[in-house]
Amino acid sequence: CKLLASLPGGSDRRWRTVLYPDGYHMLLRDLQAEAVYRDILAWLDNPAASLPSGMEVSLQSRRLQSLCEDMSAVPGSGPASPSPSGDG
């Protein structure tokens, strides 16, 4: 995804990506918030340790790439279109 590729440091693993099944944009208020909180607390305790949920994915994982492909098919989420010329 463009967002992940644009993160500082690229793919040097400073960034960790977690995909929760049926997770939405407000994960800490979601039905599975407890799992998210456990992951955050575990990460704060030891940033290098595995997360309790087991939902972490690599930036090259097929699961994440599939999500990126799905997102690029959503109108308005892909690359910005050039502005039309004229009155605008």
Image (cartoon, rainbow, N blue to C red):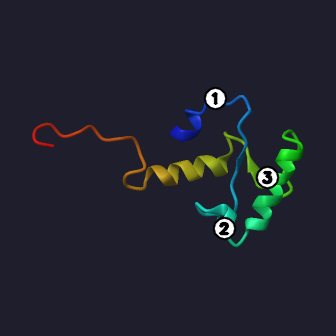
Mark found first going from the N terminus, 3 or 2: 2
Classify residue 25 by image quadrant. bottom right
Q: Is residue 58 left or right of residue 75?
A: right
Q: Residue at x 37, y 55 (%)?
A: 75
Q: Nearer the viewer, residue 44 or 67?
A: 44
Quadrant for the C terminus in the image: top left
Structural distance between the alpha carbons of marks 3 and 2? 14 Å
Q: Position of residue 17 (x, y in %)?
A: 70, 46
Classify residue 60 by image quadrant. top right
Q: Nearer the viewer, residue 88 or 61?
A: 88
Quadrant for the N terminus in the image: top right
Q: Is residue 1 left or right of residue 23?
A: left
Structural distance between the alpha carbons of marks 1 and 3? 22 Å
Image: 77 above or below 53: above
Residue under numbered circle 3: 40
Tell me the element at label 2.
helix
Label 3 neighbourhood size at 10 Å, few (<14), some (14-19), many (20+)? some
**Circle number at residue 49:** none
Is disc 2 in contact with disc 1, using a CB cutoff of under 8 Å? no
Q: Amino acid at mark 1?
A: Gly
Tell me the element at label 3.
helix
Tell me the element at label 1.
loop
Q: Residue at x 60, y 63 (%)?
A: 24
Residue under numbered circle 2: 29
Q: Position of residue 57 (x, y in %)?
A: 73, 47
Q: Nearer the viewer, residue 67 or 83?
A: 83
Is disc 1 in contact with disc 3, using a CB cutoff of under 8 Å? no
Residue under numbered circle 1: 10
Q: Position of residue 47 (x, y in %)?
A: 84, 40
Q: Amino acid at mark 3?
A: Ile
